[in-house]
Image (cartoon, coloured by chain):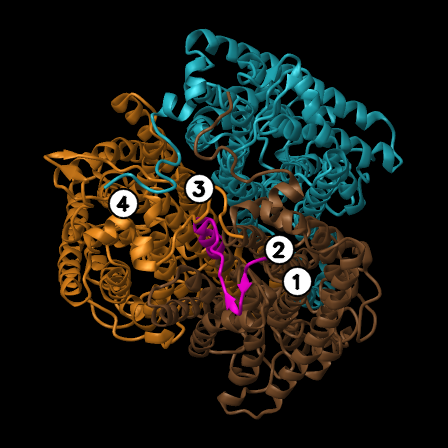
Chain colours: A cyan, B orange, C brown
Amino acid sequence: MSRNLKPKPPGQPRHRRASRRWSMLKKPIYLYLTAAILLVWSSAAVAQEAPASVFSGEAKVVADTIWVLFAASLVFFMNAGFAMLETGLCRSKNAVNLLAKNLIVFGLVSLAYWAVGFGIMFGDGNEFMGTTGFFLGGNDNSPAIGEAYDGVFSALNWAGIPLNAKFFYQLMFAGTAATIVSGAIAERARFVGFFIFSILLTSICYPMVGHWVWGGGFLQKMGFYDFAGSTVVHMVGGWAALVGAALIGPRTARYFEGKSYPIPGHNLSIATLGGLILWLGWFGFNGGSTMAADPAAISHIIVITNLAGAAGGVAGTITAWIYFGKPDLTMTINGMLIGLVSITAGCAFVTSGSAVLIGFVGGIVVVFAVDVFDNFKIDDPVGALSVHMVGGFWGTLAVGLFSVGPEKFSWYTADSGPAMGLLSGGSFSQVGIQLLGLAIVSGFTVAFSYIVWTALKYLSGIRVTLEDEKLGLDLSEHAMEAYPGFLGDEHL
Amino acid sequence: MSRNLKPKPPGQPRHRRASRRWSMLKKPIYLYLTAAILLVWSSAAVAQEAPASVFSGEAKVVADTIWVLFAASLVFFMNAGFAMLETGLCRSKNAVNLLAKNLIVFGLVSLAYWAVGFGIMFGDGNEFMGTTGFFLGGNDNSPAIGEAYDGVFSALNWAGIPLNAKFFYQLMFAGTAATIVSGAIAERARFVGFFIFSILLTSICYPMVGHWVWGGGFLQKMGFYDFAGSTVVHMVGGWAALVGAALIGPRTARYFEGKSYPIPGHNLSIATLGGLILWLGWFGFNGGSTMAADPAAISHIIVITNLAGAAGGVAGTITAWIYFGKPDLTMTINGMLIGLVSITAGCAFVTSGSAVLIGFVGGIVVVFAVDVFDNFKIDDPVGALSVHMVGGFWGTLAVGLFSVGPEKFSWYTADSGPAMGLLSGGSFSQVGIQLLGLAIVSGFTVAFSYIVWTALKYLSGIRVTLEDEKLGLDLSEHAMEAYPGFLGDEHL
Amino acid sequence: MSRNLKPKPPGQPRHRRASRRWSMLKKPIYLYLTAAILLVWSSAAVAQEAPASVFSGEAKVVADTIWVLFAASLVFFMNAGFAMLETGLCRSKNAVNLLAKNLIVFGLVSLAYWAVGFGIMFGDGNEFMGTTGFFLGGNDNSPAIGEAYDGVFSALNWAGIPLNAKFFYQLMFAGTAATIVSGAIAERARFVGFFIFSILLTSICYPMVGHWVWGGGFLQKMGFYDFAGSTVVHMVGGWAALVGAALIGPRTARYFEGKSYPIPGHNLSIATLGGLILWLGWFGFNGGSTMAADPAAISHIIVITNLAGAAGGVAGTITAWIYFGKPDLTMTINGMLIGLVSITAGCAFVTSGSAVLIGFVGGIVVVFAVDVFDNFKIDDPVGALSVHMVGGFWGTLAVGLFSVGPEKFSWYTADSGPAMGLLSGGSFSQVGIQLLGLAIVSGFTVAFSYIVWTALKYLSGIRVTLEDEKLGLDLSEHAMEAYPGFLGDEHL
């Protein structure tokens, strides 16, 4: 992501200085001796300064690749986090269904994003979509081609790691977008509908939005900034989930005579485990989005990410404590998660103080967001919308509010980051751009999701029958139970 | 592993070019000025090109060590994956037993492989076994000794990382081989038998096979290739498990009057978690087997590994959907796992398209493999044989079928990889070698396991009594329950 | 940690040689040609020798940062390990409470350690505490300032990674110290008391002790060594927990008429998972404490750590097998954990044989330690005191017994490690220093904890009512259950 975070060609400054120094020497013959003298110094200089400049070329590719593969592994692990969180927050009679969805979705996305999605998102093409690079068939434009980069084509050539590493990292993000959906439509959606929707979302919708923001598309050109995906991943996943949840309708008996009846999840132990795995995964989600092991950048981003998650968790806990009278564990989890979602867009551009504030506001908002969705009878069993959509919106907006402005951090230049945020002393302009980008992405995702979910409704069906819902999706959709004989065993 | 993937001395080509350029200058005095001029250019060139050649020596050792320790940590985590998978797929009355076996086994293997196994596997010796290097007492042949390497002795000196890092990584593989066994003999084997068998397997049998294939032994010399252990780890673990399962006999009432009565596992939430942890761990299992942070190689391998796992999971799901009428979660898990096992031998040698095919075939086969074992009344509660043995066989064979042939990938030369595979346009020869290697390893492992399990049968007993089996191994073997008072607590 | 493990300025020797070589050339004009000749050689030499010396400057910072962030991520994950371990070892009616405590504590510690703790621990100040660097406001003293280091000020300037990375890694340790407390006071402590205690512990007590030992304080100057925190983390957490457990009192009906009635945990599946996650996390806990990717050091430390954990697990299993007649799973877990705690102080200073011995002794002791605490009616539901306090004591003492002495390992000099241990042929002196340090840290932590817990007793209350304890803390403190409708669902 943040394909704008174009690292300066490493060592260039010093090299340029060096070559300027030399170019004056190439002309007159009588300067040869002078050249020799200077060489003595400069060679010594090379030897002594070498450490400062050698971190480029192969060594940099190696370090960047290690970092990105490590980060990708953390993001991959988020699949386990979502699986545990969503399963734990739903009823045991639907546990197998949630586990199956969260497991198969990454298999499907891996194949779909390999075949189609990655090419649309980062392949050469136009401002709306890439049209090359399917089946990992594109040229490996690593290491960076440098000056050939023009912001539209060869979207990822600013990163020097192998194409396979770029794909692997980006794949994890596609997987995250898809897995957000499974939670919001849980406990009443048909397995086959989710199965097909996931393929289409990550083949078409998600990569197109990704192309606009990270692949050299029109939003990127417009100056819209979303460092690690508050919009690209969380808004897209969130809107796709919301449209699905709205079209599929709430769980039976969830709303009755104008009142809302929450249904508690069956296993908060694994839900909390899932939350902690997601927190861990976020270090890779944000920290790896540099696609390079820039020590200052990745250290900053990871600290910022953690502070926002921490502040969100504390804020969610305290808000629920005051509001409900008790520190509600699910609000600690949701607060922490919305803190992480909220900082995702701006983690490379804000200070640690702003991160705490962003996370804290998110943690307060999430407690009330659930009620808002409830008022519209949008039934979201695991709080995915409150966390990902609300957090995605707030995080994207926060870029326009809190960004410190270029040149404050070594990795953040006018070319690679947003204008100074409104609350940091900047103007409204970045806020406007962020809101415009949010509106465009939201409109497109809603339209896409509406069409696909509606088509699926008539083709395969998207909701189980009332009998099946009563019985539980585990038996009706999978003919299995999650915990047979848990408390003693009738077998043998 | 893949101790053949001998990296070329890094940077050498360019250095040689450089010294050739210079050597012509050393002779005539009147060339000094020319030298000076050239130096101007070349020094600038050194400054600018330096990055391309500096990645060797200490920097490379550091990067390789970080990569290998990261990969080893992922593989270590597979212990948790196996523990959750196996426990979840068995009954709650045997959960403590499975947890205890999966936890203690890594402790035992750590000590046994440190004391004996590592020396037999990679120590200097002959073509059948290493005879030195016990208790990590060998010379640290890092960084690579280079030319001194002769394919028999100092098996791991092609890798430049410290001996401790080599040991740590290899230890994780030994642990995996041992832990495969615990699943297949679950719910009726005695704890003490598994305890002793694990020590012997990882002290003797596994390291000997490892020596043959990776330690400079006769299979390695023969041209048998198993990049990350489809044979060495999964076939060995699988055969050891099969012999154990056969000798211990099926669980009571599992087969009755010619029919098979499957016994469902008690906790699919943790089983799915285990499956996802294993998927994650496999990135280290295959990606770390380079024992070096070669960016192109590790990126390729990780992508290939993931695609095969994804294809296997999708194939398993669809096959079960068609075959059983429902998408069976355990078949999604098993399909994904066999995809990963199948790609383990060839992940450095095949294309992404082949990886998808290999994984997909694995995912189909695994659904039917269970029935095959059932026909022989080999009772395998967690599907370990279908996944590891069948997958190990298919993966090892696939090397002979799909390998692209040398020089297609930068890390894959005629010295470091198999001949072109049959389906890539090659001959039958590599297929033949792969089958021969499989036969030899299988024969040895079966013989070893038969002797040890039979000896244990008379010495310590390998099967609990019928009463204990009914009661559950948790109470009979450990005097504990896994979930006392789970649904409310009578204490206090 | 181990802020004494000051790496030699990398590459310096060769550079100094190089400049000496050149300095003789700068004077006489007639040496220009000679200079040119030499340049030919030396430039070639630069090209060829470069690899050996370039691992410094930026490349080293990058590698060190990757390593430390990786290690920090592993330690972060220990939060999930503690959450699962503690929750699994307690009753289901208190599961939400334990999950909530283990989740919120890291949020609180993140904010508290960012605002105050890190400054007190590593900020410039005096020998008792740092007085600068709050809110990450200190100067980034990376890369290392070298000679300016004086052992008191700028405590972490021996490490070259960015300040944010240093903070992130150290934060994880603060989190660990706090989370140890939650287990020992489980099932009867009020949530609000733990909430406040955690903030104070990681704002004041833990950072002060950390300053003494790692931040340039008086214990560090005295020659007290605790490489990765047997004392700083585990003794501090352990004593804070013990004082809390003692003041809060045992769970009702835990001790009755002079006898002890153990209360089994409700979920050994997640407890074992937690144990395995902790084992994994320890590779980062000890391996990252170098704060640098020194290949030899980190490989050694990780192997040593694993061997001690393995030996502890095996010893705990065997001891319980002999003592109780059955291999007790919780003793396997506790044995493994005390092995890891015990090796934490000395992992950089001892041999693998000593590591096995240290872990093995720990694993035996832990089985009996529980009884000792029982005799004093200190009720510790998860064995936190037996593991962390006993292990922390033994590990700190073991430094004085088993350290090999300076110059045996490349990273262990007289400046950066303890004197040779008593059993390695050294004198009593290091043992004495270790015991003195233990006494001082223990005294301070006990005093601090006593004051804070006592104050909380009167301000907020630290123990729930008997009715609430009977009902379970989940309902009384959080108005939630962990597993509602687990075995079938009355909803709908």
Q: Amino acid at mark 4?
A: Ala
- Is there a contact, CB below 8 Å, between mark 4 and mark 3? no
Residue A107: quarter of image: top left
Q: Amino acid at mark 2?
A: Phe
Q: Which residue is mark 1?
A: C57
Cα separation, mark 4 vs mark 2, equals: 46 Å
- Is there a contact, CB below 8 Å, between mark 2 and mark 1? yes
Q: Residue at x 58, y 68 (%)?
A: C377
Chain designation of label 1: C
User: Which secondary structure, mark 1?
Assistant: helix
Q: Position of residue B41 (x, y in %)?
A: 63, 55
Within-10-Å neighbours for mark 1: few <14, some 14–19, many 20+: many
Please provide the residue range marked out in magenta: C252-276
Cα separation, mark 2 vs mark 3, equals: 40 Å
Chain designation of label 4: B
Asked whether C237 or C132 is in front, the reply is C237
Q: Position of residue A103 (x, y in %)?
A: 43, 33
Q: Nearer the viewer, mark 4 or mark 2?
A: 4
Q: Which residue is mark 4?
A: B384
Give the position of the N terminus of chain B as an image quadrant: bottom left
Find the residue positioned furthest to the top.
Answer: A458
Q: Which residue is mark 2?
A: A55
